[in-house]
Image (tube, rainbow, N blue to C red):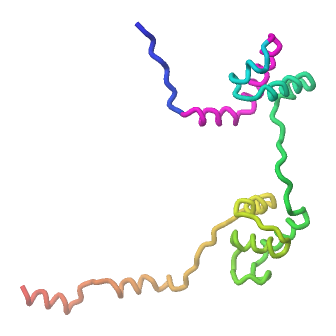
């Protein structure tokens, strides 16, 4: 009698992304790779097992030799430098905290497009929507949707009652006479 094969219902990419989120797990994997190198395995042999290059495995070993287990932790990665300096970001924050009409915009609220236009006009830098969000978020601001105010909504119920096709007393009399 053969054994039943165990099945996983998630795809490999989902599992892989979940593994990468756990810092302790990735540190443990790296430590185990260092352990296997210490046992005499070659980095090239471990490439397929760890789904990484032999250069990365060599780097893990060098970092372990230099710093111990702490060297196997993920390090912060630097991204592209911002095209705006701190003073420019401060000016953007100050402008957004005020009304856009003060900056000669015809809108009453700041939108993504208006903030982008403000940055482009004042600093000569174009950004996409996501980057504008990141700039605002780094300044401690968040984007909020405006709540629409419609003055005509106050009389809406009366207008609906007027428009409704409800039988009037005259139309009721006509239907009785026809029957």
**Furthest-bottom residue in view?**
170
In percent of the image, x 63 and y 68: which residue is there? Answer: 145
> Percent from the top left, x then y, of residue 133?
73, 61
**Furthest-front residue in view?**
44
Tell which of 43 and 128 is nearer to you: 43
Which quadrant of the figure contains the N terminus? top left
Tell which of 45 and 3 is nearer to you: 45
> Percent from the top left, x then y, of residue 103?
79, 81
> Magenta: predominant secondary structure element?
helix
Displayed quadrant of residue 98: bottom right
Tell which of 77 and 172 is nearer to you: 77
In percent of the image, x 75 and y 74: which residue is there? Answer: 117
55 versus 172 height, above or below: above
- Left or right? Give the position of 122 relative to 3: right
Displayed quadrant of residue 21: top right
Q: Which residues are magenta?
A: 11-40
**Furthest-top residue in view?**
1
């Amino acid at each position: 009698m053969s054994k039943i094969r165990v099945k996983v219902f998630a795809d490999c990419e989902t599992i892989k992304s979940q593994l990468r989120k756990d810092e302790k797990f990735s540190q443990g994997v790296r430590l185990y790779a260092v352990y296997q190198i210490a046992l005499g395995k070659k980095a090239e042999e471990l490439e397929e097992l760890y789904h990484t290059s032999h250069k990365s495995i060599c780097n893990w070993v060098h970092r372990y030799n230099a710093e111990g287990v702490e060297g196997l932790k993920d390090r912060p990665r630097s991204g592209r430098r911002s095209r705006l300096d701190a003073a420019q970001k401060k000016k953007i924050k100050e402008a957004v905290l005020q009304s856009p009409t003060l900056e000669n915009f015809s809108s009453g609220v700041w939108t993504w497009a208006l903030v982008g236009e403000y940055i482009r006009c004042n600093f000569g830098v174009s950004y996409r929507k996501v980057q504008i969000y990141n700039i605002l978020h780094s300044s401690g601001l968040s984007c909020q949707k405006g709540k629409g105010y419609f003055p005509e909504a106050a009389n809406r119920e009366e207008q609906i009652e007027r428009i409704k096709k409800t039988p009037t007393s005259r139309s009721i009399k006509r239907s009785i006479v026809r029957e």
